[in-house]
Image (tube, rainbow, N blue to C red):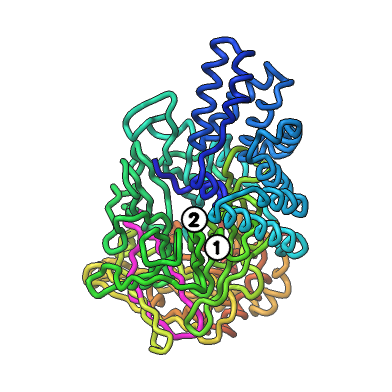
Amino acid sequence: MLKRIILSFLLVTFFFLGKAQINNELKSELQKLLTEPEKKILTTADNHYKNQEYIASLGLYDSLAKAYPDNLYLKYLLGTCQCYNTFYFSKAEENIKAAEPIKSKLLDYDFYLGKVYQNNDRYIDAIKQFELYLANPLPDTLKSVVNHQIEICKNSAEQLNKGTIASITNIGPPVNTAASEYSPLLPGHENFMVFTYLGPKSKGGKQKLPGKSDPKGTYFEDVFISQKKDSGNWDEPKPIDAINTNGNDAPLFISHDGQKLYLFRNVALGSGDIFVSYLKGTEWSIPEKLKGINSNYWEGSICFSPDEKIVYFSSERPGGQGGRDIWFAQLMPDGIYGNIKNLGTTINTTFDEDAPFVTADGNTMFFSSTGHNSTGGYDIFRSDMKNGKWGTPYNIGKPVNSNQDDKYYWVSADGQRAYYSTERKGGYGLQDIYLVEPGMFGKPTALIVLKGVVYADDKKVEAGIKIKSKYGRKNFSGAFTSNSATGKYLLNIPSGNEFEVEFTYKDLRMVKSISTVTLDSFASLTSDINLYSKEYLKKMAVDTTQLKSDVGTLSMNYDEFLAKYGSMVADSVTFKVQVGAYKFIENFNFNKLLQLPAVRRQTYADGITRFTLGEFNTLKKADDMCKQAKKIAIKDAFVIALYKNNRLPLDDLIKGNYFKKQ
């Protein structure tokens, strides 16, 4: 069974060169002490140990060690297994050190003591132990592995004095459990999180092979989803049944609009491939194999440029720098990705590179690597786009990176948050999901997130959306859709250009112009799109008096009215700035509204659909916003009063004695 979550490079490579050692002499002495049932436990534990299944053997050795607390060989076996679980790092050091009197019979004693020192951030001591181990007659390949660990310890010691200005927080239950949760993915609106789950809730339970239950088998990966509550907390995660099989299913990338979910699948014996599922309304489609990328080799991570013209993915195919490499491909005229190339030695090393992620503005790539100046296992690295090429990556440091596997770094569009998975002390299980704030360090992302709902004749629809830049030197274009059930859409529009955004539904069409020429930071704009057929407009009767300000009907001068009542509040009365209705929707200049609150569309009890800015409890606050709107964008904006969702003439506020002093 192939899982994307793996042990660090050391653990994989070291035991690839030579199986974990069981000392037959010490084992024979131990067996003389054991009962027949205990001998069976030891045999099972040893078999797991030989197969590098250290977590499985840990509990078995632990039960024997408790029964025979003075047996140093058991302490050593238990301690080496505890090296692979963050809960037991301190205990591992204690148990391995206890076996020092028999170290002459333990060929790998110095190595494991170095490893446990490394786990406990004692890097100078770890280096000394690894150097002692190197004094043994080792093959050159194994010497290379140990020297790499020494280099990792040196990198770790250096990173202790650097670090990043960020805080990390375990997001806790209900997402994180005693099982493994990793590879978190969120769409641009961040309303839900998709992640990989591996544990007792996995489909099929423990299996020997997919579909073959076996209580002695292992769990397979599943795709889970958790909705974000209004409080900001996460809801109880649920499996996505349309996606999960009895084999390995793990999320790799979700499109920024949340409409496409890319997956790793390994449903039987094989290398594992990349699939894609589409959100149809509120349901995910049956995944289909992605064309153009998959090969006869392992492909296990994927991400896209903002316009989805470039795809980045990790693969073990030949022709790379070694191990897992990050590759890229271009979207071809037939809609399939091709012209596949290795990303080169700037990013890839002779070790493993995996889990690429490109930020919403397309200018930064995060990825995980066991090479470069890794501090142990996979570390997260950052590379910035410079003159059309990815620059030299750098380790983002502590507290994000640890001496365990740190992977699957996802960054919000505004760069304020990131989520990733790691296994570290104080977690809830093996791999856990953590929140990083801020998610980006240094210069912020520069883009507009344009979002809203597409309506056709006042019904939410699945519309086609095309975006195209006007300046060819910074060419950007893409085709997207709104959700068929909710009509919601989300677009990431980069800085430094003029754009045309076209919305189409059947024979209805609307084009919006968006300018980001002077944009140097993050901005969010909500714009609902209203497409109307001629037949529908003929049926729609609009009271034109509702499209105009009622200031002229006041029994006093508006300035006098504002001075007298502007700071007062009235029960169940709110004030908004009206910037249009059906008649004026085509005249909106959304570029100028970037500095204002989001434009909201709502049909009130009087049957009139209005487009408004803000919601205020006093006329004065609304008037201030109105003046700002007039100055920046819309000259004919005006303030309206609403009483229990019905428009109320300003003069009626006086006649009805609605006001009371604040």
Q: Is residue 354 visible?
A: yes
Which residue lies under the disc numbered 1? 412
The magenta span reads: 478-502
- Residue type at mark 2: give it: Leu
> Secondary structure beneath disc 2?
loop
Q: Residue at x 64, y 30 (%)?
A: 78
Q: Residue at x 53, y 82 (%)?
A: 386
* Viewer-proximal residue among 72 and 561: 72
Q: Residue at x 30, y 68 (%)?
A: 337
* Viewer-proximal residue among 141 and 125: 141
Examine the rendered structure and indicate whether residue 595 appears above or below residue 410: below
- Considering only order in the chain, which callout, 2 or 1, is on the residue closer to the N terminus? 2
Q: Which disc number belongs to residue 186?
A: 2
Q: Quadrant of the C terminus?
A: bottom right
Q: Residue furthest front?
A: 137
Alpha carbon separation for disc pair 1 and 2: 8 Å
Badge 2 crowding class, 10 Å Cα cut-off, few under 14, some 14 to 19, many 20 or more, is many
Q: Residue at x 30, y 65 (%)?
A: 463
Magenta stretch contains residue 485:
yes
Q: Quadrant of the N terminus?
A: top left
Residue 470, position as x, y percentages in the image: 39, 87
- Residue type at mark 1: give it: Ser
Residue 575, position as x, y percentages in the image: 60, 65
Is there CB contact under 8 Å for labels 1 and 2?
Answer: yes
Examine the rendered structure and indicate whether residue 393 appears above or below residue 135: below
Residue 69 lies in what quarter of the image?
top right
